[in-house]
Image: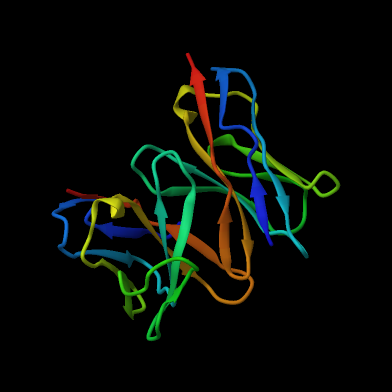
Amino acid sequence: AQSVAQPEDQVNVAEGNPLTVKCTYSVSGNPYLFWYVQYPNRGLQFLLKYITGDNLVKGSYGFEAEFNKSQTSFHLKKPSALVSDSALYFCAVRALGKLVFGTGTRLLVSP
Amino acid sequence: GAVVSQHPSRVICKSGTSVKIECRSLDFQATTMFWYRQFPKQSLMLMATSNEGSKATYEQGVEKDKFLINHASLTLSTLTVTSAHPEDSSFYICSAREGQGAVYEQYFGPGTRLTVT
């Protein structure tokens, strides 16, 4: 079965520091991978996706993610965190026409 | 990107009553829409996939007679929670698919907070 794992429930980082939110996947075939962000009481906002091509994917709000096939990872990164980046982040894989989400990682950026 | 709206954003109802939640794709046609449920501090769980003009496909463990889904047009899908109980209280999020085949985008609505008293 297709799945993604987000091993960290929460990530804490100081404003201005780089951030990484981890995601590993398990799929058969080529993976279609996504990152979404959710602010309190809101739906999901699309950040970026990997379908094919360059392993480094650039997305919205300065975020990027690196697809690593050998490590089956798709970690979300940002060079310099902002307090406003504090939110819940979901990694997802598309399988059989459906999105399968990870358990989410709460990012807390302190001033 | 495309916009998906949900109405209402919040609803409080009494136990035993039914509640209807609307999901609309505002600037594109969506032959397929998805309904998710999210419990506090948990991930999104897919409840069902609705296709315009046909019956919805429910995920295992989701009661189709309790969660009625109608996708009557290319821009509107509705989820009706029938005979609601407190355990149905949750955050419901819809999503609409734009495009067909292997290349498509999925856009999410802002969610509906349902509280059953």
Examine the image and state in which quarter residue A74 appears.
top right
Depth order, front residue of B68/A18: B68
Examine the image and state in which quarter residue B95 appears.
bottom left
Name the residue located 44 percent from the left edge and 77 percent from the top edge: B31
Side of B37 relative to B83 (left or right): right
Name the residue located 54 percent from the left edge and 41 percent from the top edge: A104
Name the residue located 42 percent from the left edge and 60 percent from the top edge: B2
Depth order, front residue of B62/B95: B62
Counting from the top left corner in percent of width and height, residue B59 is at: 48, 68
Depth order, front residue of B92/B9: B92
Counting from the top left corner in percent of width and height, residue B102 is at: 64, 72
Side of B12 relative to A33 (left or right): left
Depth order, front residue of B58/B4: B58
Q: Is residue A70 above or below residue A32?
A: above
Counting from the top left corner in percent of width and height, residue B81 is at: 26, 65
Q: Residue at the right extreme?
A: A70
Side of A65 relative to A40 (left or right): right
Model colouring: rainbow
Counting from the top left corner in percent of width and height, residue B66 is at: 30, 69
Residue A34 appears in the picture as rendered: yes
Q: Is residue A61 above or below residue A36?
A: above
Residue B77 appears in the picture as rendered: no
Q: How many marks?
A: 0
